[in-house]
């Protein structure tokens, strides 16, 4: 009897791929919203909707992210946990330092607004991930 | 902790990837256990014991 070929895996069904795709979608949604908000002719309610639009996509990303973490083996889970343990306090100290600097000097809004500071959090996380992975190699 | 995982794996001529597949973990996990950089959880330690048909204490020991 001829062996049946294995069914092709649905690319989107794989947790890791879905997590990456939804992450990209979230990233794109942010930049679309940001581009839209550059226009000054939009009514306030549209601007608010645009600003909040990435949030449900982030919620979807978070569900996928948690699912991906739960599907990892124990060492990978530990690596991500240690990376979070480094990145989260770093994020806090960044915000705390900016809060104090704001009282010390006049910080340029163009350089240190929410729009510029949020990106440091994923940067801290990925840097920490790289450092922690090296430790277990 | 010390372990004899590398020795036991070599006796069966398994690669790290093969052993990882048998234990449903990543190759990185096997490598980290063998190099002493990571101590496995209790379920994984028992799974290793079952795979090699040896008690956990004969595979893992305190330094």
Image: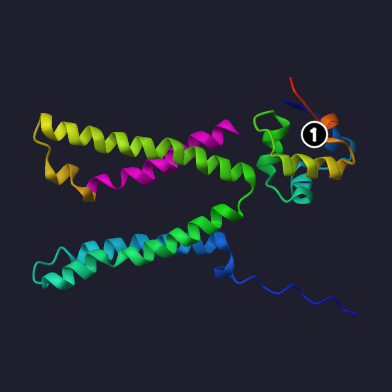
* Marker count (numbered): 1
Classify A61 as above or below A127.
Answer: below
Residue A48 vs residue B42: left or right? left
The residue identified by callout 1 is B5
- Is A75 within the magenta? no
- Nearer to me, A131 or A99: A99
Which residues, given as a range, are shown in magenta?
A116-137
> What secondary structure characterizes most of the magenta part?
helix
Residue B42: give x, y in percent of width and height: 72, 40
Residue A93 vs residue A78: left or right? left
**What is the secondary structure assignment of the residue under circle 1?**
helix
Residue B39 position by quadrant: top right
| x 35%, y 67%: residue | A56
Residue A96: give x, y in percent of width and height: 25, 35
Q: Chain of mark 1?
A: B
Classify A122 as above or below A62.
Answer: above
Residue A98: give x, y in percent of width and height: 21, 36
Residue B54: give x, y in percent of width and height: 89, 37
| x 83%, y 38%: residue | B9
């Amino acid at each position: 009897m001829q062996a049946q070929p294995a069914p092709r895996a649905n690319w989107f069904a794989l947790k890791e791929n879905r997590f990456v795709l939804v992450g990209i979608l979230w990233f794109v949604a942010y930049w679309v919203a940001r581009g839209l908000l550059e226009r000054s002719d939009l009514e306030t309610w549209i601007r608010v909707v645009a600003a909040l639009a990435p949030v449900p996509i982030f919620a979807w990303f978070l569900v996928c992210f948690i699912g991906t973490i739960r599907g990892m083996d124990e060492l990978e889970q530990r690596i991500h946990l240690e990376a979070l343990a480094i990145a989260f306090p770093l994020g806090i100290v960044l915000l705390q330092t900016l809060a104090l600097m704001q009282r010390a000097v006049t910080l340029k809004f163009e350089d240190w607004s929410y729009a510029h500071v949020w990106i440091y959090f994923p940067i801290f996380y990925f840097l920490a991930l790289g450092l922690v992975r090296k430790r277990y190699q | 902790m010390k372990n004899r995982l590398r020795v036991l794996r070599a006796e069966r001529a398994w690669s790290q990837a093969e052993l990882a597949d048998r234990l449903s973990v990543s190759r990185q996990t096997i490598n980290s256990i063998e190099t002493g950089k990571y101590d496995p959880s209790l379920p994984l330690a028992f799974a290793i014991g079952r795979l090699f048909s040896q008690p956990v204490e004969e595979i893992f020991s305190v330094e």
